[in-house]
Image (cartoon, rainbow, N blue to C red):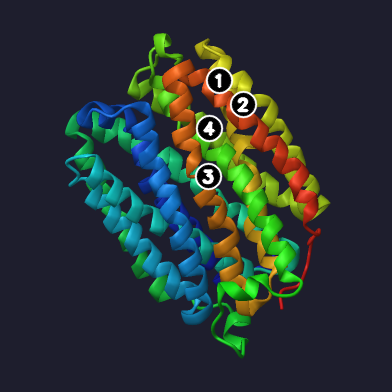
Amino acid sequence: MRSITRRQWITLFAAQAGYMLDAMDVLLFVFTVNVLRSEFHLSAAQAGLVSSFTLLFSAGGGIVFGVLSDRIGRAQALIWSILIFSVASAGTALSWNLGSLLFWRALIGIGLGAEWSTGAVLVAETWPAEHRAKAVGIMQSGWALGYMLAAGMTALILPRFGWRALFLAGLLPALLVLVIRQYVPEPEVWQRGEVKGSSVGELFQGALRRRTIFASILASCVLFAYWGLFTWIPGFLSSPASGGGAGLTIVRTSGFVVPMQLGAFAGYVAFGWLADKIGRRPAFVSYVLAAAILTPVYGATRDEHTLLMLGPLIGFFGTGFFSMFGAMLSELYPTRVRGAGLGFVYNIGRGCSALAPWTVGYFADHYGIGTSLGLNSAFFALGAVLVFSLPETKQAELA
């Protein structure tokens, strides 16, 4: 990777930082879910509904900003996405009931969808074909870093200053906008484009129709599995054994999540190297099948040492495969509709996966949270089949 320029590295790390801070703001809710349930007297299903709102609105944010990035530029759209989720995180601190909580988490969902759509296409268009999956994997690893950052902030701020102060700290990512404005230019392939604009309708014309439909179904399945599992893992770890949980304290839960996300970080990065070497589809299948096997095992485990050992493996295989989407989807769509394609496919998946936190929460109320986590295994396995509905795009040049 010695041929990579300073500009390409700066763009990559800016997008990675944006995704890291986006993840931090989104996942602060995951770490405070039991505190907020007590504060607002929420059932597990209602708490799951809050996360579902975030995911549902992320679909709209991702689609709109995907189209917007084709019109105004990738870097400009990224700036606006960061401002949205930062303000929404701070707004969460003002919540006083379930309705206001839903409003702010819906707004942060818009920023979540927007940030990935713009950041992924920015990196994919800036880096060369032979290293594209590696770069997207590094960008995607920002989610794991954000997860750990959220865990650390929760352990540091929540016991001392309360949940409102914790969410107010989510305003800090807005400072990243200053760096992007100064140092991150628009990709050359976008600047050369003759048509600055796109529409979702173009994604369903000609050869793009089949790609859009099957890629959306694939994204929906694995995103359902991810959000159904990882939204509730902190709740599973901190719930009492009588409710099917592991019975850890909030601070110990944060400690368990960190090694899990270190595994996720390694999974994202390793996937990029593997996908550039053996192809997008084989790498994806190996990850999601491993996740399908590990998920029910993790949900059935109560021994702390075993949970600590399984955590990094769940993180590695249960999240690392997402590095495929930024690279592969960029390679499936031409420049004029690339932002729209990534935004639509990935965030339609997010929108459909909005049912996952509520579904797992519903079954948790009836059968215990640990047992309910195992439901996500089938969706991981289905993803291993659906990926073969899309062409292999290893080292494809963007046009």
Report the Cα–Cα distance between label 3 and label 2.
17 Å
Label of residue 299 in the image: 1
Residue 291 appears at what percent x and percent y? Answer: 66, 32
Kindly tell me whether residue 150 is visible in this rendering.
no
Is the C-beta separation of discs 2 and 4 under 8 Å? Answer: yes
Kindly tell me whether residue 86 is visible in this rendering.
yes
* SS assignment at label 1: helix
Residue 222 appears at what percent x and percent y? Answer: 62, 43
Report the Cα–Cα distance between label 2 and label 4.
8 Å
The residue labelled by disc 4 is: 229
Is the C-beta separation of discs 2 and 1 under 8 Å? Answer: yes
In front: label 3 or label 1: 3
* SS assignment at label 2: helix
The residue labelled by disc 2 is: 295
- The amino acid pointed to by label 1 is Gly
Report the Cα–Cα distance between label 2 and label 1.
6 Å
The residue labelled by disc 3 is: 353
Q: Residue at x 33, y 48 (%)?
A: 105
Classify 10 Å Cα crowding around label 4: few (below 14), some (14-19), many (20 and above).
Answer: many
Viewed as shown, does residue 309 lie left or right of 36?
Answer: right
Please name whichever residue, 191 or 336, is drawn nearer the observer in this view of the structure. Answer: 336
Classify 10 Å Cα crowding around label 1: few (below 14), some (14-19), many (20 and above).
Answer: many
Q: Please report whichever mark, 3 or 2, sits nearer to the chain's N-terminal start.
A: 2
Q: Please report whichever mark, 1 or 4, sits nearer to the chain's N-terminal start.
A: 4
Viewed as shown, does residue 357 lie left or right of 191?
Answer: left
Classify 10 Å Cα crowding around label 3: few (below 14), some (14-19), many (20 and above).
Answer: many
Note whether 374 is above or below 243 in the view shown.
below
Residue 125 appears at what percent x and percent y? Answer: 62, 71
Report the Cα–Cα distance between label 1 and label 4.
9 Å
* SS assignment at label 3: loop
In front: label 4 or label 3: 3
- The amino acid pointed to by label 2 is Thr
